[in-house]
Image (cartoon, helix red, strand yellow):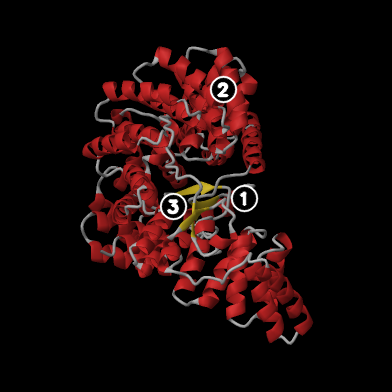
Amino acid sequence: MARRLFILCMVLLPLTASAQFNVDRLIMSGRSALYYEDYILAIQHFNRAILSKPYLYEPWFLRGVAKFYLDDFVGAENDCDEAIKLNPYVVNLYDLRGLCRIRQGKYEGAISDYDRALKDSPSAQNYWFNRMLCRLELKDYEHAHHDLDTIISKWSNYSRAYSVKASVYLQQKDTVNATVWLDKALEKDPYDAEMWMTRASISLAKEQWKDVDEQLTKAIRLKPNMVPNYVNRALARLNSNNLRGAMEDYDKAIELDPENFLAHYNRGLLRIQVGDDNRAISDFDYVLKMEPNNLMATLNRAILLHKTGKLRDAIRDYTKIIDQYPNFWMGLANRAECYRRLGMTAQAELDEFKIFQAQMGKRVGMQQRWSKEQLRQTRKKSEIDMSKYNQYVVEDEEVVEHEFEYDNIYRGKVQNRKVETDYMPMYTLSYFPYANVIKSYQVFDNLVDDYNRKNTPKPTIRLNCNPVSMTEEQSQQMFALIDTLAAEIQASSDLQQSKNLLLRRAVASSVVQNYADAIDDLNTCLEIDNNMALAYWHRAVCLSQEGKATNAQVAETEIREGAAMDDFTKALEFSPNNPYILFDRGNLKLAKGDLQGAIDDYTKAIEGNPHLAEAYYNRGLARINAGKREQGIEDLSKAGELGIYSAYSMIKQNAK
């Protein structure tokens, strides 16, 4: 009788907790959602916390973080304003608001935020750096230099400060000092792509084409997806007569950015140069689709259409130019020739008469052929001079973009999870269908199916892997389900019924990433029935996920991982060959650094389900990391065959 009374008290305990405890849980769940980049869900948690206690600054701040990563910079700034009113002594608030203002181009406001932040945290390197970049955006070079000198004096090994100082000198047209500071930067860190890009921009200004090629090649090795590097290197290669290399660079630039104007335009000119007229036309078609009124591109296409015999289309393009420039004699002459070839003699004679009048006035000479010197000349993108139609285009002003720094722990941890996110995540109980983008079927598991058949929960419990972020409507549905289940638990006096309601609420809580409440419910559930395999399994998953999402100490993380391992082992006692539990335990072993143990569990999972694509994928990566590259690639190949298409990119990365 005493045990039954204790269990009932445990069931009702979450409902009688203090409001402070509930708000703390909401904030913790929101932090977890931030960690997993589920920003919509995070906002829902913080909305509830703000509604309960609007005088706490933390939910305002954290909701601002979520909005910042959703690119809602206005909303994030407003939340920071509210948080600062409630607690003006938290430095991170000024940092976040400064970044929101930067994204909106409010550099003066951002500078005032960093001024305030630096009063309390004068040793925060990123505050100094971001304030300096704001001053650079405002072309306040004097104060930018002052900030850079301070950064260099405090952090003498911070190579980015040296490279940005070079950029400031470059913007001041002082290439001598820019070169000196770049050399210092490269001494500190020869693996910074931004420095090589800045160095290349100096060489580009001096038309030192060989140096540009070498420097941008180094930058591309370090940052292979920066489109301007390929466009600029192509220009250097053109001037070094490396036409094949230039074409490869333009192709790569367009592959990375299909709408890149310069790459399409210049590749069109290069194709003209090598006699590939039809494909040159397709490039200028694309340019004119982006900029229908670009007369320079129109003229190039007109000449190509004329040359390839598409005379009516050529006349259309020549006419468009002549309408803007009635005395464009080359256009008139070419259009007259098109008219004659089509038998339209009257129209041809009108154009020829205009040219004859001009020749009588000695206002026009012979059309020049493309010389080698002309082919290597360039014009600015905004420059409109019809005599320069055959010149390669460069940006009006070469600018090396600098990245602002944000040392926020939530996003920072997400970025640092690169190794973890390479692996497919754990299977978990959910109310949402299988969303792993592999095949359009629902995962079947005996444990889950038996539970649904015996208890008919609504909604049905499912097994999921890597669920997509919920919409606002879906998250509201989950919160409503939690409230409904809470009321049913409070009204229930039947332990068996309470046990099932607790499991369902635990699943709902984990779906909204409130792992602490889910674990509490599962603890109580197992007090009622310590033979419930699903509860052990799901508690193990929740313990694993909570450990990742919280900023826990190493010892605390190890305790959680140990408890999760015990739960997986217990669940496997009830379902010894369950491939999904084995897969999840393998993931936990990976997190603990036990590669061989993980490989063994994945192997057992595959024996239980030979079509479990995630197990092949994770075992493949684990084998590669364990030095068994050939076996790992074989597993990745099987995972790709079963539908995990990202496996092919991993094969490519590990092929050499």
Return the residue at label 2. 80
Mark 3 vs mark 2: give the one in front. Answer: 3
**Label placed on residue 456:** 1
Q: Which residue type carries mark 1?
A: Thr
Q: Where's the C terminus, which quadrant?
A: bottom left
Residue 276 in view of the camera: yes
* Residue 615 visible, this angle: no
Q: How many marks?
A: 3
Of badges 2 and 1, nearer the viewer stands 2
- In the rendered view, would you say 8 is above or below 445? above
Query: SS class of the residue under badge 2?
Result: helix
Q: Which residue is mark 3?
A: 228
- Between 43 and 587, the residue placed more toward the observer is 43
In the image, residue 303 sits, relative to residue 456, either above or below, namely below
- Image location (x, y in percent) of residue 355: 69, 72
User: In the shown orientation, is residue 570 left or right of residue 41?
Assistant: left
Between the C-alphas of marks 3 and 1, the distance is 58 Å
Position of residue 80 in the picture relative to residue 575 (left or right): right
Q: Amino acid at mark 3?
A: Pro
**In this rendering, the label closer to the viewer, 3 or 1:** 3
The disc labelled 2 sits on which kind of residue?
Cys
Q: Which mark is residue 527?
A: none
Q: CA distance from mark 2 to mark 1?
A: 46 Å
